Image (cartoon, helix red, strand yellow):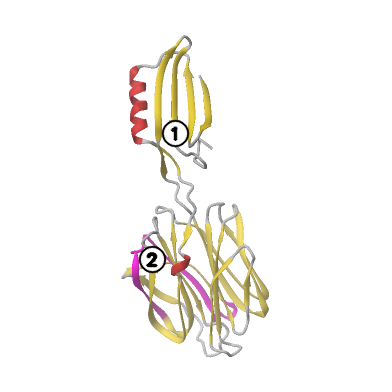
Amino acid sequence: MSIDHSCRNENHYNHATRQGARIPMIAVLIGLLVLGAGIGLADDTDIVVDAGNISTYNSSSSSSFSWSHTVGTSLTSRYLVVCFSLSGNTTSTPTGIQVSSVSYAGTSMTRRVSQDTNGTQGRTEIWDLLAPATGSNSVSVVLSTSTQVVASAVGFGNVSQTSPSRSSASTRANSTSISLAVTSASRDVLVDVVSATYPITLTPNSNQTKRWDLAVGTNSTDLRGSGSTKPGFGTYDGVSWTLSSATNWSISAESIQPPNTPTLARFVDFKASDTARGTLLRWRTGYEVKNLGFR
């Protein structure tokens, strides 16, 4: 068998295969069915960050609160992430602070990863929800105790609906730089959240996009919370930040993965003809750039 592949003609791609023996009519019928139905190829659509609908909340003292967040109606294969920075190095903050529960539009979310700062007086957490309701709904939060908090909700589209989270990681230290390795892949998107103290400034690596940056209070022991997203670059990946001066900090991150489900590549023409050397099949498909198996 020989195959002539990807001879481009305007907006179509031409393909041919020659079989040494004649192909029964059933093969032609199958080809016609394929022509009408299309074929499945691995989807390589990029994950979409719903940047226009990122929402935030901050308070100097809260134990139970809510805010409105919108999940874009144009998003498909949706995924919602809510990130928390809790009080940093405040002496009045009790140890063991954490988020007790989070819900969106009345549906409970799941804690993905968390990390205390040194001294356990600060904390970062990431919660997520698969297939959240679209439109404007409430993010409702209960903390284990009243404390300073910065929170943000970020929606994503084109996310795997069977295994949306590839991995998560967290770490902490007292330093002027933050670095966290995260298992990822080239089509993933990483989201991370940092908890530090005010008036520290937080600057993400140049390949990260800062999505929020809020301070609570103006004292040196008050809270600053920040977060970013970035595209995944490969199996070994990560996020990093630079701090204006050394302080206790914690960081949590999650690598979100896209779907690996069939996408349609439709045939526009299919022909079978007898030749002296066997049966020749010819077909044309539509636009094929980045379609697995035809690239």
Q: Characterize the local packing of mark 2: few (<14), some (14-19) or many (20 or more) Cα atoms within 10 angstroms.
A: many
Q: Characterize the local packing of mark 1: few (<14), some (14-19) or many (20 or more) Cα atoms within 10 angstroms.
A: many
Residue 287 versus residue 290: which sits nearer the camera?
Answer: 287
Pinpoint residue 66: horizontal percent, then vertical percent.
37, 79
Q: Amino acid at mark 1?
A: Thr
Residue 139 versus residue 136: which sits nearer the camera?
Answer: 136
- The answer to whether residue 248 is above or below residue 104 is below
Residue numbers of the magenta segment? 117-143
- The answer to whether residue 75 is above or below residue 137 is above
Q: Identify the residue at image location x=44%, y=37%.
A: 286
Q: Identify the residue at image location x=41%, y=84%.
A: 63
Q: Identify the residue at image location x=34%, y=35%.
A: 37
Question: In terms of image quadrants, where is residue 155?
Answer: bottom left
**Residue bearing the label numbered 1:** 285
Pinpoint residue 75: horizontal percent, then vertical percent.
40, 59
Which element carries disc 1, helix, strand or loop?
strand
Question: In terms of image quadrants, where is residue 163?
Answer: bottom left
User: Residue lying farthest left?
Assistant: 106
Which element carries disc 2, helix, strand or loop?
strand
Q: Earlier in the sequence, mark 2 or mark 1?
A: 2
Label 2, label 1: how far apart the Cα atoms are? 35 Å
Q: Which circle, 2 or 1, is nearer the viewer? A: 1
**Residue bearing the label numbered 2:** 71
Pinpoint residue 292: horizontal percent, then vertical percent.
50, 39
Q: Amino acid at mark 2?
A: Val
- The answer to whether residue 125 is above or below residue 189 is below
